[in-house]
Amino acid sequence: MGLAAVAPAWAVPPAPPTPFTDPNSGIEFVRIDHASNPAYDGFDPFGNRVRGRGSVSYEYSIGKYEVTSGQWAEFFDAALNRADGPIPWVTAPFTTGGTANPMLPTGGITWRTAAVYCNWLTNNKSLDRSAFMNGAYDVSTFGYVGQTFTDQFTHNEGATYWIPTWDEWLKAAHYDPWRDNGDGTTGGWWQYSTSSDVAPIYGPPPGFVNGSPLNQANAGFLAANLSDQFRIPLGAYDVTSPWGLYDTAGATIEWTE
């Protein structure tokens, strides 16, 4: 899961901005500026799911890494180990490094768990039960009518942390305001979130079970007796999105609004 947040704006830089550690959450963020960027208009293997999307009219910040096992462990301890009973809709993941391996990815986070996590961050990690129940998303809306979710899918106005919108994630993963187009112009979209129009090479990183320095993304391979990628630390590949985000092409699945 990635994370978006509000942070103070600053002047547009000539190169990808320097990551900063948010003092409230302790999470390392990257500022995404160049507001009102053009939408993606290239090849769309998903029909209209990507074409025409990705334009964002404001500045925002997004996590340099997916939420780490160490960050999830702090949240789960606060939400589940409680004298007044666990917080509803928070379910434990199927794999995590916990505090012992804090930079490992965490697998099996539900959308609702992610939403409650954003509530908790928005309320400054308060241990009060109400801090988990609203802030970014109103937990009282979580439910079903038949097989249809009734959840509040867009964050509250004034929320300081939220699950990224589809447009926010696309821009942070694929749009490059510094791209050299070779014709004297700059700015444009990469087809892949590894700052390339060529599909990434999947495989373990150097030093991990015969990993190759040419491998670029944590997906699509078997890692030592494990069926997936959860033993490989976040940020292990020397490949990022144009804004410097790691593991946008691998590690765990990204939730969006």
Image (tube, grey):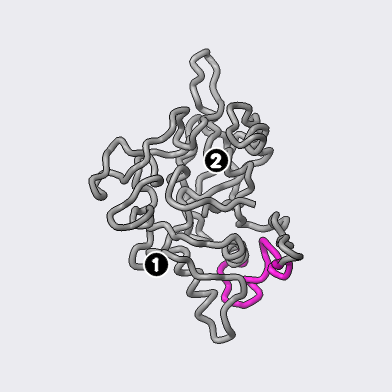
Q: Nearer the viewer, residue 226 or 116?
A: 226
Work out whether 189 lies above or below 150: above
Q: Decide if residue 35 is in sight here.
A: no
From the viewer's perspective, is residue 27 above or below residue 179? below
Q: Judge by depth and name the residue closer to the eye, 147 or 3.
A: 147
Q: Can you see residue 189?
A: yes
Horizontal side, residue 36 vs residue 248: left or right = right
Percent x, y of residue 129:
62, 77
Residue under the image location 66 percent in, 71 percent down: 133
Image coords of residue 56 (percent x, y) = 66, 38
Task: Give the secondary structure at mark 1.
Answer: loop
Q: Which residues are magenta?
A: 122-143
Residue depicted at x 54% and y 74%: 79
The kind of residue tagged 2 is Ala
Query: Going 61% across and 66% down the picture, which residue do you hit?
Result: 116
| Label 1 – label 2 distance at C-alpha | 27 Å
Q: Report helix, strand or loop for mark 2.
A: helix
Query: Relative to 166, is 216 on the left or the right?
Result: left
* Image disc number at residue 98: 1
In the displayed image of the protein, which residue is found farthest to the front?
146
Based on the displayed image, in which of its 4 quarters is residue 36 positioned?
top right
In the displayed structure, 190 sits above or below 171; it is: above
Please name the residue that numbered disc 2 is placed on.
172
Pointer 1 and pointer 2: residues touching (CB < 8 Å)? Answer: no
Residue at the limit of the structure toward the right, as seen here = 145
From the image, give the main secondary structure of the stretch colored magenta: loop
Please state the horizontal and vertical placement of residue 176, each as a whole percent of the image: 53, 31
> Residue 233 location, x and y as percent?
35, 54
Total labels: the figure holds: 2
Dot 2 alpha-carbon crowd within 10 angstroms: few under 14, some 14 to 19, many 20 or more = many
* Mark with earlier residue (1, 2): 1
Identify residue type, mark 1.
Gly
